[in-house]
Image (cartoon, helix red, strand yellow):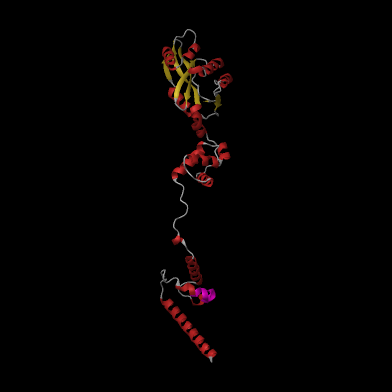
Amino acid sequence: MLAYATGLVNQELLLQNEYLAAENRILRSHCKQVLRLNDRERPRWPRFGKRLGRMAVQQVACVAGPDTILAWYRRLIAHKFDGSKQRRDAGRPRTTPEIEELVVRLARENSGWGYDRILGALGNLGHRVSDQTVGNILRRHGTAPAPKRSRTTTWTDFIHRHRAVLAGTDFFTVEVLTWRGLVTWYVLFFLHLDSRKVTIGGITEHPDAEWMQQMARNATLGPWGHLNGCRYVLHDRDTKFCRSFQETLAVAEVKCLRLPARSPNLNAYAEMGTLGEAGVLVTVDSVWRRLAQASSPAIHGTLPCGAEP
């Protein structure tokens, strides 16, 4: 008796389902527009679609496809375990731009400093960060680690780090009006890169090796030397800067840095000064007068015989 009643109920439910499915198809055929479901209506289908299975849903679903309905079910499960609303904060605060800029500056100005050394410098300044944070900041700015950074120092960085002990030297010419006519004289000058102070080393018609050696002695002589406090001298590949000139400066612990050929930009400060003085036309008397005013007493002994400063 119970089985008979149960069978009647199941048969009635099947008939109801077939009737509703047929009704949905007819209504769907008359409804040409796509149904737009809101957030309240969308979660109703996944619960039943999951229990029916994909094959059964494909036979009866009219509002959306089986893949869409099952995707709604997965989204419903994910929403259940979403705890973003219960979070009190968004995680660890981001490093401030001031600290990030300081880390990059320390790394670029000190090519031999690793993460730990930079971390110690930041600690001395009162900033508390981890070595991993320092590494992440440097990677974001494309800064290599300490071993690679020390081998890839640019010329601009070298100039800025050592400009307090760097000097540039070069020649410019002046056309001196004498009784013989126009005579080309060569003026040797030194330029301190940090202070931009320009000093005249000497002037001569024939800058030979002996004269250049004497100019090197004058440049490193006692308190009057133009290169006192400098460790490096930049000059081009002009043959006037001979071996005796370089060796005399090396005795005073001043190293000559001979620049590559056709690279005036590497000694830009001195080259700009050369362009500013090129093509000057003066008389011989004014040359000695300007030289005496601009130079130290140590170079007076190098003037030609019979010339009065």
Q: How many circles with numbers are drawn on the protein?
A: 0
Q: What is the span of residues highlighted in magenta in the rendered image?
A: 48-56
Q: Main secondary structure of the magenta part?
A: helix
Front-lying residue, 235 or 278: 235
Q: Is residue 106 above or below residue 271?
A: below
Q: Is residue 46 above or below residue 242?
A: below
Q: Horizontal and vertical percent for residue 247? A: 58, 20
Q: Horizontal and vertical percent for residue 53? A: 53, 74
Q: Horizontal and vertical percent for residue 308? A: 45, 9
Q: In this view, does 109 lie above or below 230?
A: below
Front-lying residue, 106 or 209: 106
* Quarter containing the C terminus: top left
Front-lying residue, 161 or 286: 161
Q: Residue at x 48, y 12 (%)?
A: 300
Front-lying residue, 6 or 267: 6
* Whether residue 235 is visible: no
| Residue placed furthest toward the top | 306
* Residue 74 lies in the magenta stretch: no
Q: Horizontal and vertical percent for residue 176? A: 44, 15
Q: Residue at x 48, y 82 (%)?
A: 17
* Whether residue 146 is visible: yes
